[in-house]
Amino acid sequence: MYGTFSDRVYWLVAQIPPGYVASYGQIATYAGSPGAARAVGNLMRTSHINSPTPIPWQRVINAQGKIPSKGDVARAELQRYLLEKEGIHFSPSGTVSFTEFGWTPDWIPWE
DNA sequence: GTGATGACACAAT
DNA sequence: AATTGTGCCATCA
């Protein structure tokens, strides 16, 4: 069920409730591969294509609490819109407070 | 199997 | 505070 890294990542992201966010590093760590933040990024980028089920990819942002906009401004704007719609507040500089909106899983199936 | 790539993280400058 | 360099891990050609 959770055989691969991507399976675990998808599952974890799917657990994030509306109004909360998590960082790539966090997800990677919970998925069992600390430091695999980049891999998580790749998965989020292609999630809407590869994920068997829809996942709230917009709730995963970088460790700075910001939304990276590497050559894809449209996605970044959409993401911010979706998050604000869920009640997440962005500071004037465009960052999200993990202290307020940070999420941590209660338990993990494979642990 | 090898090398390149990427929504990143972290320490050093 | 802003940049730059280095490390890390999972894909994919």
Image: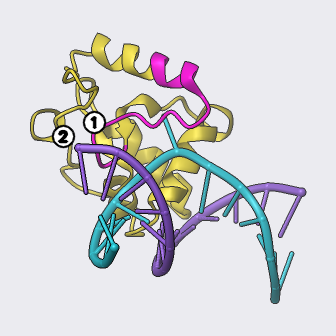
Chain colours: A yellow, B cyan, C purple
Residue A21 x/y as whole percent: 28, 36
Q: Do callouts 2 and 1 point to residues on the same chain?
A: yes
Question: What kind of element bears circle 2?
Answer: loop
Magenta span has A58?
no
Label 1 crowd (10 A; few <14 / some 14-19 / many >=20): many
Residue A82 x/y as whole percent: 38, 16
Tell me the tag on residue A102.
2
Residue A16 x/y as whole percent: 30, 36
Label 2 crowd (10 A; few <14 / some 14-19 / many >=20): some
Question: Are circles 2 and 1 on residues that touch, CB within 8 Å?
Answer: yes
Residue at 16%, 35% in the rendered image:
A97
Residue at 28%, 26% in the rendered image:
A94
The residue that label 1 is drawn on is A21
Magenta span has A74?
yes
Image: magenta residue range: A62-78
Residue A56 seen anywhere in this rendered image of the structure: no
The type of residue carrying mark 2 is: Gly
Earlier-in-chain disc, 2 versus 1 = 1
The type of residue carrying mark 1 is: Val
> Magenta region's main secondary structure?
loop
Which residue appears farthest toward the left when viewing the image? A99
Residue A7 seen anywhere in this rendered image of the structure: yes
Q: Quadrant of residue A60?
A: top left
Residue A39 x/y as whole percent: 54, 58
Query: Could you tell me how far apart the alpha carbons at marks 2 and 1 are, in whole angstroms?
Result: 5 Å
Query: Could you tell whether B2 is left or right of A56 in the image?
Result: right
- Quarter of the image that includes the C terminus of chain A: bottom left
Residue at 29%, 57% in the rendered image:
A108
Query: Could you tell whether A39 is left or right of A95 in the image?
Result: right
To which chain does the residue with label 1 belong?
Answer: A
Foreground residue among B1 and A66:
A66
